[in-house]
Amino acid sequence: MSSKSSLVYYLLVSLLSSGVVLAGAFLYFSEVEQKWEKKFKELENRDINIIIPENASVTEEMLIMNVYKKVSPCVVHITSTALKWNFFMEIVPQQGIGSGFIISKDGYIVTNNHVIAGAEFIKVKLADGEELDASLVGADPQNDVAVLKIDPPHDLPVVELGDSDKLQVGMLAIAIGNPFGLDRTVTVGVISALNRTIKSEEGIMENLIQTDASINPGNSGGPLVNSKGEVIGMNTAIYTTSGGSIGIGFAIPINKVKKITEEIISKGEIKAYAWLGIYGYTLTPELAEYLGLPVSEGVVVSYVVPGGPAEKAGLRGGSEQIIFKNELLTIGGDIIVSIDDIEIKSMKQLRKLISSHEPGDIIKVGYIRDNKLEYTTVKLGRRI
């Protein structure tokens, strides 16, 4: 990277806010941005920056480059423009940037909802530099998924979707996107953890893939791919204290993205799913022994959504946090052990059981509180 490019890069990094940052950064049209617009154009046609670990072998480098060649033609740069009122009651254009990937030859594109939320105009730039207007087909704000449609003059290259249910910690993870709106970058890491939960502007996001492949603002909506070049997730957020990437990124599992996308395309909207209104995690025998619990399996309720079905039924979340095996856990809440007399052994099983119901269904929940088995009935709510 040239010294001028580095200057632009680090200035942009310093402008980003701290905390959990949704990776589609919003940039405002201002005198400062106009000053740097020329710099961006100079960088627009620079060489692809492929960041490969120093200890990677020649074989690994070839694999990564082959994956890039396969996937990069399907990755797009997205620019969204919203019209906002400023302090002086003047309409000011507000621009958002992000990435996306093509899922059909006729122009359907998947990205994050926060990349295009509130946009009046959406532009998509293809890998060959062609820029096209895009329309919003539909979105799922809760899960941060949106589907766009462009009308290309020719068939488009399409990504190959993998199976996120087969992922394991330690597998190769390759992130492709447009960090800071500059140009395509490929970063390489591994899957650090599965089934992560983070807070977002829309609430809580569950069942995320955690990776140490660097994900920076502008990478939102871009694909996370495996060693075969199959998309296994959609990059959605980074955890940072400085505004840049510090090695903890999150992606939505592609199986979840696929399900949401198919429904949006076929119906233009998302089906309402049954909702229990809790956030929790799987109780392991090791944790149960450490806490001295009377059961060794179930789901620990870490948080109960205020006004949600679970709270109305009397279920309680945790009130204390501990670190167990390098994980921050909330404890002290109810432990769900059964649904309609079916034993619950994991959070994944609980989600599957709840999703098999319809909003309004009444279920019997067995749970442990103060080392005693209790029961309650819950009328499931509606969640998009």
Image (spheres, rainbow, N blue to C red):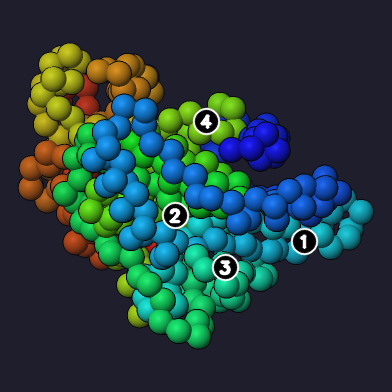
Give the Cα separation between the discs numbered 3 and 2: 17 Å
Q: Amino acid at mark 1?
A: Pro
State the residue position of label 4. Answer: 240
The number of numbered badges drawn on the structure is: 4
**Nearer-the-camera pick, 295 or 167:** 167
Give the Cα separation between the discs numbered 1 and 2: 24 Å
Give the Cα separation between the discs numbered 2 and 4: 19 Å
Judged by depth in the image, the label closer to the viewer, 1 or 3, is: 3
Residue 180: give x, y in percent of width and height. Answer: 60, 46
Q: Secondary structure at mark 2?
A: loop
Residue 204: give x, y in percent of width and height. Answer: 43, 44
Sequence-wise, the earlier of marks 3 and 2 is 3
Judged by depth in the image, the label closer to the viewer, 3 or 4, is: 3
Name the residue: 11% across, 38% down. Answer: 345
Name the residue: 33% across, 65% down. Answer: 159
Give the Cα separation between the discs numbered 4 and 1: 27 Å
Q: Secondary structure at mark 4?
A: strand
In the picture, the disc for residue 222 is 2
State the residue position of label 1. Answer: 93
Q: Does 273 appear above or below 314?
A: below
**Nearer-the-camera pick, 9 or 122:** 9
Residue 258: give x, y in percent of width and height. Answer: 31, 64
Sequence-wise, the earlier of marks 1 and 2 is 1
- The quadrant of the picture occupied by the C terminus is bottom left
Q: Amino acid at mark 3?
A: Gly
